Amino acid sequence: MPNSFTFDTSAVGNSNAGHWFTDDKTRPGRIGRRLTNDERYDLIEYLKAASYSEYPRTVVNRPDPEPCVSGDAQ
């Protein structure tokens, strides 16, 4: 199919294994230090209460990506 590709989930950064806050610097998916229980609960409460305007974000001006289609779509 034109303009299609296979998404390789075995490639670094493409898995659905999630991200980790851990002190183990060798763990794949590590994005920060281990959080204390208080920090974890504070983060959950923030995410429950924050509005979209409060989330940090960067606007990137470029064309939208091509839509994903399954291999069966013709």
Image (cartoon, rainbow, N blue to C red):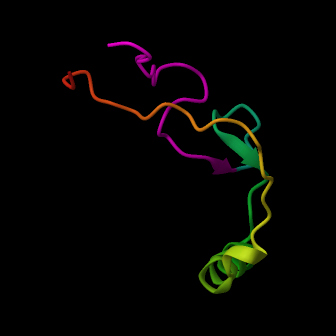
Q: Quadrant of the C terminus?
A: top left
Q: In the rendered picture of this protein, how many numbered marks are placed on residues? A: 0
Report whether 47 appears left or right of 55: left
Is residue 3 placed above or below 57 in the rendered structure?
A: above
The answer to which quarter of the image holds residue 54 is bottom right
Q: Residue at x 25, y 21 (%)?
A: 71
- In the rendered image, residue 5, in percent from the top left (x then y), is placed at 43, 16
Q: Residue at x 43, y 35 (%)?
A: 67
Is residue 20 placed above or below 54 in the rendered structure?
A: above
Was residue 18 drawn as part of the magenta stretch in this picture? Answer: yes
Is residue 23 placed above or below 63 in the rendered structure?
A: below
- In the rendered image, residue 45, in percent from the top left (x then y), is placed at 65, 84
The answer to which quarter of the image holds residue 41 is bottom right
Is residue 18 placed above or below 47 in the rendered structure?
A: above
Relative to the observer, which residue lies in front, 50 or 16?
50
Q: Quadrant of the N terminus?
A: top left
Was residue 63 drawn as part of the magenta stretch in this picture? Answer: no
Relative to the observer, which residue lies in front, 63 or 17?
63
- In the rendered image, residue 52, in percent from the top left (x then y), is placed at 68, 74
The answer to which quarter of the image holds residue 50 is bottom right
Report whether 58 appears left or right of 68: right
Relative to the observer, which residue lies in front, 45 or 58?
58
Residue situated furthest top in the rendering:
2
Which span is picked out in magenta? 1-21
Q: Residue at x 54, y 19 (%)?
A: 11
- In the rendered image, residue 9, in percent from the top left (x then y), is placed at 45, 25
Report whether 38 appears left or right of 63: right
Q: Main secondary structure of the magenta part?
A: loop
